[in-house]
Image (cartoon, coloured by chain):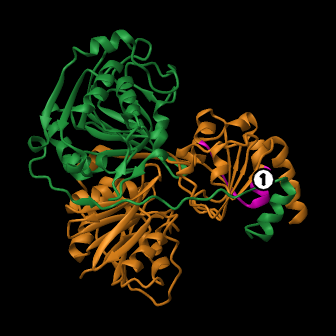
Amino acid sequence: MAGTLVVAEISEGRVKKSTLSAVTFARQVGGPFAVLVLGGGAAAAAKELTAFGAQKVIAVDDAALATYVCERYAPTVAKVAKDGGYETVAVTASAFGKDLAPRVAAKLGAGYAPDISLLKVDSGKRLYRRPMYAGNALGWLEITTPVHVVSVRQTEFAAAEPSGGASPVEAAPRAPDDAAAARIEFVKLEVTKSERPDLGEARVVVSGGRSLKEQFKQVLEPLADALGAAMGASRAACDAGYAPPELQVGQTGRTVAPQLYVAVGISGAIQHIAGMKGSKTIVAINKDPDAPIFQIADYGLVQDLFVAVPELVTELKKQG
Amino acid sequence: MKILVAVKRVADPENLNKIKLSPQGKVDTTGLEPKASPYDDYALETALRLTENGANPKQRLGEVVVVTFGPKETEQMLRAMLGTGADRAIRVDTTDDALDGDVVARGLKSVVGAEKPDLVLLGYQQAESESNEVGQMLAEHLGWPQATFAGSIQSQDDKALLVGREVEGAVAQVRVTLPAVVTVLDKIVKPKSVHSKHTAATHAYPDGVRFAALMAIMAAKKKPLAEQKLADVAPDASLKVRYGAAELPPKRAAGVKVKDVKELVTKLKTEAKVV
């Protein structure tokens, strides 16, 4: 059958919300789609995906897939795609999707459209739009092979809502590992514990720059608490060690597009802007009136952040 | 250890907001200084750290070969990298129009076949195309393991590497048995991110990449720089993707300046309705 195969990402037996962005893409492609769930506990996780209009949910539940290693996952994804005759394999462009999709594409001899922000169908031909040049140009890419492999940006493809119905769950076996699988071993996952929402999924992000220095947490945390926000940081703040690296927003860090982005003491280097300019409302607080961040901010406040931020926390509580 | 570092020349990544579009929708980078894609510089730094004792970097304890796909002008970048410390360079003669990720991966596969490195290092993402694919495709074509998004690498014995992969909110540590393909993040050039088997665990590098000394730049003119043809390294490769006319993204207009915190909160509540 022709159609789209969405590859789900699971974590601790639950489907990650990011998967639903790839489901949105599959709906836009039109025609039937199936969802493939791989991993330890995939059979149970597959049940979370039966109400999204998929023709079926394929579960490859195998203890050997308990931890993600591309060399174990890619052969199964490629085999399911090939056996099912799917025209398109879609993932969300998370670290998982970006690691997996190119290897699957190479296995299938398929063209790969990475990190796309928009799909356009033009007289039967599919065109994929993707940000390039640090977001300063939007390229339109066409895949010339019969099979397409695509990773979609979570920030531009909103999470799919359930559409009802009950897709059947079908069990499938794991394909034999790549020979390379014998030469890679998962050692451990060190999770950075956070009480805050995930940067990629937060409705509000509060980000700080280098000028916060050692007071990064002390100044920003109350604001993030007041707004129920995830915390982010500029590359300069992370490089200087004021903020942990996983907070980095920008071309090398995370790409975010929250409803509200508050940039505190961030000048607005192009690599930072590339990672947050899709935000709905941008607030910039900076004492330098010429900081480039003000050119893209909806609301700019020229003030010393060490004065403005505590005042903002108080005012939010007062007006709250 | 012998390491192949695949690099790409791009327009100055710090000034990509100055690109223009031709009426045909072709990206014009005129006026921007050509440079190596920054993550490729980090890959070279990683390769040098893995083939030396950090306490005595002048003594080379392995071989680093840099390879690029591009026109004659890209030799300037390769010469600079030879000055920084790479031992040899290879330029596969071509133009960007003839390349996509898969063509480069296939071409690299034959370079790997001839060079037989223990490790191929690449930047995790290319600055112009913002694509992140060549390393994974190469690993598949070679049948090698891959470790992408590397923020740290330790080599105990040069037979295997312990790689810290930075994934959302976590570090996934993997052990890869060489030969393998590894792609690196900017974090890899932090003082303690890379340890070769020759370097003491306590050693701390200066933050960032090293720069070539003038003497080394002069000496680099004598280092070997080989040229190959794309048709020879990737004879059966054809483009699997094609780019049409590009667009400029919609400009985000500058908004308003508010006079104080009170006005800001009021606007966020009543105008933007986001708090």
User: What colour is chain B?
Assistant: green
- Mark 1 highlights which residue? A223
Residue B26 appears at what percent x and percent y? 33, 54
Give me the chain that's orange: A
Q: Local crowd at mark 1 within 10 Å, few (<14), some, or many (≥20)?
A: many
Image coordinates of residue B164 in percent, x first then y, are 45, 40
Q: Is residue A161 visible?
A: yes
**Amino acid type at mark 1:** Leu
Q: Residue at x 23, y 69 (%)?
A: A147
Q: Residue at x 43, y 55 (%)?
A: A137
- Verify whether residue A93 appears in magenta: no
Q: Residue furthest front?
A: B23
Between residues B186 and A244, which one lies in front from this camera angle? B186
Near-viewer residue (B140 or B95): B95
Q: Is residue B161 above or below residue B144?
A: above
| Magenta part of the chain | A222-234
Q: Is residue B208 left or right of residue A208?
A: left
Q: Chain of mark 1?
A: A
